[in-house]
Image: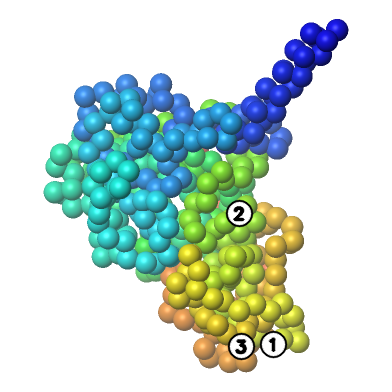
């Protein structure tokens, strides 16, 4: 009897350990999502005898039992893969730099590998950066918003690979905002590093699906295409909940911020602070210019690890706290409209960055004209329906 009790206890504890691993289970499925980086048997044979470059950051990891993980670079080196260099996107290889901060070339202190920055003045690898490479691996966690710059880095990596006959291997990861598609489709006149392609604000694709679309739609310079291989995930179904085990960037600290990010990022193009300089980034918003009788939440932005120079630094801001707001499955315009209508000075509300984030000039104009959120959303629908048809050939997972 005691022996049976001991066996059952050990079995129970084993199950608890398994359930606490960093490989995240979905809420509605008993099957564990196996990210592409963990499927080493699918890509290690492709790297044999090859000189390899890595595009990665702090999210480029292989998950281990009991909540542990190993960085992809460290794993490849342990498997005697000839890794030659690392390419770092916005926020740097270890993910500690501010948004917009210029990242410099350097040396990774752990591996002594050279790091080539792909953010700042140099967003695309130069031919001399690629001349000693046969293949590049792209493995970065995305959050599914057009203005999140990792997909722009993907574009330039694909373009450089195509122009220099380098193979590209994309290791796929879940899109935490992949269960809906919404927002205005970018117009080509507003192309920038926060919007490279004619897609909606919330595009609904994984990074692997997105790479396929870039390639086959011939969105790269002069219509070139790279030799692309996407390693899929196992047991991933779009629409099932996925919490990122590692922060994708300094100012997206949790699932709530990731869910609200597509809606609140528009404030980056206004005089409203979206929580930078606090511990609640993209979960609150506010400004000294908003009416405190309407916006009763107060906060004061101060420099921190994710924002050295936050908007309205050391000034009292009036706004809203959205930490307890229900999760969104659409792009919310209500907060943006409310802030505009209750600011002290409408002439200084928008800045030059807003139209780049929107991907057009019409959203700002519609807000200034007093259009309702419903009317503005109606103006997107034709383009959204066309986009949903366009992406079908590139989808890799059940929806």
Q: Position of residue 101 (x, y in %)?
A: 37, 67
Q: Does the image show residue 115?
A: yes
Residue at left offset 15%, top offset 39% = 132
**What colouring does the structure picture have?**
rainbow
Quadrant including the C terminus: top right
Is residue 232 in view from this perspective?
no
The disc placed on residue 289 is 3
**Residue receiving disc 1:** 291
Please identify the quarter of the rendering in which residue 237 is found. top right
Determine whether label 1 and label 2 are within 8 Å by CB. Answer: no
Q: x and y percent of residue 286 in the render?
A: 62, 78
Q: Secondary structure at mark 2?
A: loop
The residue under the point 38% across, 58% down is 90
Residue situated in front as seen by the camera: 74 or 180: 74
Secondary structure at badge 3 equals: loop
Q: Which residue is mark 2?
A: 254
Q: Spatial distance from mark 2 to mark 3, Cα to Cα?
A: 28 Å
How many angstroms separate mark 1 from mark 3 (CA)?
7 Å
Residue 338 screen position, x and y as percent: 68, 78
N-terminal-most mark, 2 or 3: 2
**Element assignment for label 1:** loop
Residue 243 in the image: state x and y as whole percent.
Answer: 61, 45
Q: Nearer the viewer, residue 211 or 198?
A: 211
Residue visible at 56% across and 43% down?
245
Q: Are marks 2 and 3 in contact (CB under 8 Å)?
A: no
Q: Residues within 10 Å of mark 1 (few under 14, many from 20)?
A: some
- Are there few (<14), some (14-19), or many (20+) residues within 10 Å of tag 3? many
Q: Residue visible at 42% across and 54% down?
A: 95
Quadrant containing the N terminus is top right
Of marks 1 and 2, which one's residue comes earlier in the chain? 2
Mark identifier at residue 65: none
């Amino acid at each position: 009897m005691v022996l049976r009790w001991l066996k059952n206890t050990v079995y129970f504890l084993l199950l608890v350990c398994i359930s606490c691993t960093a490989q995240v289970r979905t809420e509605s499925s008993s099957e564990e999502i196996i990210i592409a980086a963990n499927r080493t048997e699918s890509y290690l044979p492709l790297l044999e005898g090859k000189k390899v470059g890595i595009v990665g950051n702090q999210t480029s990891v292989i998950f281990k039992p009991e909540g542990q993980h190993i960085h992809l670079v460290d794993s490849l080196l342990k498997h005697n893969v000839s890794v030659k260099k690392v390419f770092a996107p916005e926020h740097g290889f270890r993910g500690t730099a501010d948004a917009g901060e210029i990242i410099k070339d350097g040396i990774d202190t752990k591996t002594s590998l050279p790091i080539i920055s792909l953010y700042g003045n140099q967003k695309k690898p130069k031919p001399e950066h690629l001349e000693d490479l046969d293949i590049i691996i792209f493995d970065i966690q995305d959050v599914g918003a057009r203005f999140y710059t990792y997909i722009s880095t993907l574009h330039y990596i694909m373009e450089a690979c195509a122009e220099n006959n380098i193979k590209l291997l994309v290791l796929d990861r879940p899109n935490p905002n992949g269960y809906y598609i919404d927002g205005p489709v970018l117009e080509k006149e507003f192309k920038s590093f926060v919007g490279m392609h004619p897609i909606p604000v919330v595009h609904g694709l994984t990074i692997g699906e997105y790479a396929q679309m870039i390639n086959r739609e011939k969105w790269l310079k002069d219509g070139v295409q790279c030799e692309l291989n996407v390693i899929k995930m196992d047991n991933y179904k779009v629409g099932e909940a996925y919490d990122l085990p590692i922060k994708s960037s300094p100012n997206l600290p949790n699932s709530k911020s990731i869910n609200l990010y597509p809606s609140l990022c528009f404030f980056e193009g206004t005089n409203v602070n979206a929580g930078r300089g606090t511990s609640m980034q993209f979960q609150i918003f506010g400004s000294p210019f908003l009416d405190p009788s309407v916006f009763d939440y107060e906060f004061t932005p101060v420099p921190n690890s994710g924002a050295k120079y936050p908007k309205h630094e050391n000034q009292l801001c009036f706004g809203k706290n959205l930490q307890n707001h229900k999760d969104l499955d659409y792009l919310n315009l209500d907060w943006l409209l409310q802030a505009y209508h209750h600011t002290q000075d409408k002439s200084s509300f928008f800045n030059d960055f807003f139209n780049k984030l929107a991907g057009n000039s019409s959203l700002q104009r519609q807000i200034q004209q007093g259009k309702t959120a419903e009317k503005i959303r109606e103006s997107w629908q034709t383009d959204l329906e066309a986009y949903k048809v366009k992406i079908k050939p590139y989808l890799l997972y059940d929806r």
